[in-house]
Image: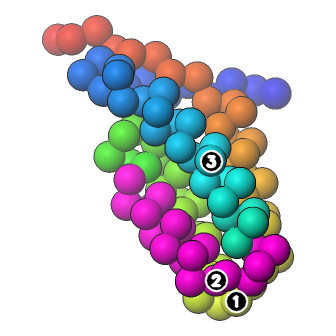
């Protein structure tokens, strides 16, 4: 599996591991919500990811979150699962490098 290198501001060093761990928890939460057809919960979590990913330096998480949000609006459960798979793949591939302060 190809590693995805993401350069992050060292000021975020303490926040990043928890942020990424919470996205892994979101996969479990979203999977459970998908089984329960809880599209409102899926929409909310997708929206939250869309808003937070880029702020932490993980634009692909924002893109996936937006796609999850859209798929929930469209009631496209297959696409929601596809996006969850993409998120898991991204999290498994991402490697964080903390840039040195200027």
Where is residue 52 shown, x and y percent of the image? 38, 53
Which residue is denoted by mark 3 in the rendering?
Answer: 25
How many residues crowd mark 3 within 10 Å: few (<14), some (14–19), many (20+)?
few
Magenta stretch mostly in which secondary structure? helix
Stretch in magenta? 34-52
Quadrant in the picture for residue 88: top right
Q: What separation in Å lies between label 1 and label 3 (alpha carbons)?
A: 22 Å
Quick check: 35 left or right of 56?
A: right
Q: What separation in Å lies between label 1 and label 2 (alpha carbons)?
A: 7 Å
Where is residue 94 shown, x and y percent of the image? 61, 30
CB contact under 8 Å: marks 1 and 2: yes
Disc 2 element: helix
Q: Is residue 44 above or below residue 101?
A: below
Q: Which residue does the image show at 64% across and 83% down from the upper left? A: 39
Does any portion of residue 55 appear in the rendered image? yes
Q: Earlier in the sequence, mark 1 or mark 3?
A: 3
43 falls in the magenta region? yes
Q: Which residue does the image show at 58% across and 60% down from the upper left? A: 64
Q: Quadrant of the N terminus?
A: top right
Q: What separation in Å lies between label 3 and label 2 (alpha carbons)?
A: 17 Å
Q: Which residue does the image show at 53% across and 43% down from the upper left? A: 22
Which residue is denoted by mark 2 in the rendering?
Answer: 39
How has the structure been colored for display?
rainbow
Where is residue 68 shown, x and y percent of the image? 61, 70
Which residue is denoted by mark 1 in the rendering?
Answer: 75
């Amino acid at each position: 599996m190809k590693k995805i290198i993401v350069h992050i501001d060292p000021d975020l060093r303490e926040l990043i591991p928890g942020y990424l761990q919470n996205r892994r928890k979101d996969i479990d939460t979203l999977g459970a919500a998908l089984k329960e057809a809880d599209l409102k919960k899926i929409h909310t979590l997708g929206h939250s990811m869309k808003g937070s990913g880029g702020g932490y330096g993980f634009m692909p998480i924002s893109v996936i979150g937006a796609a999850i949000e859209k798929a929930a609006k469209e009631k496209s459960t297959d696409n929601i699962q596809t996006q969850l798979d993409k998120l898991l793949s991204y999290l498994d591939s991402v490697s964080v490098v903390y840039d040195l302060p200027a």
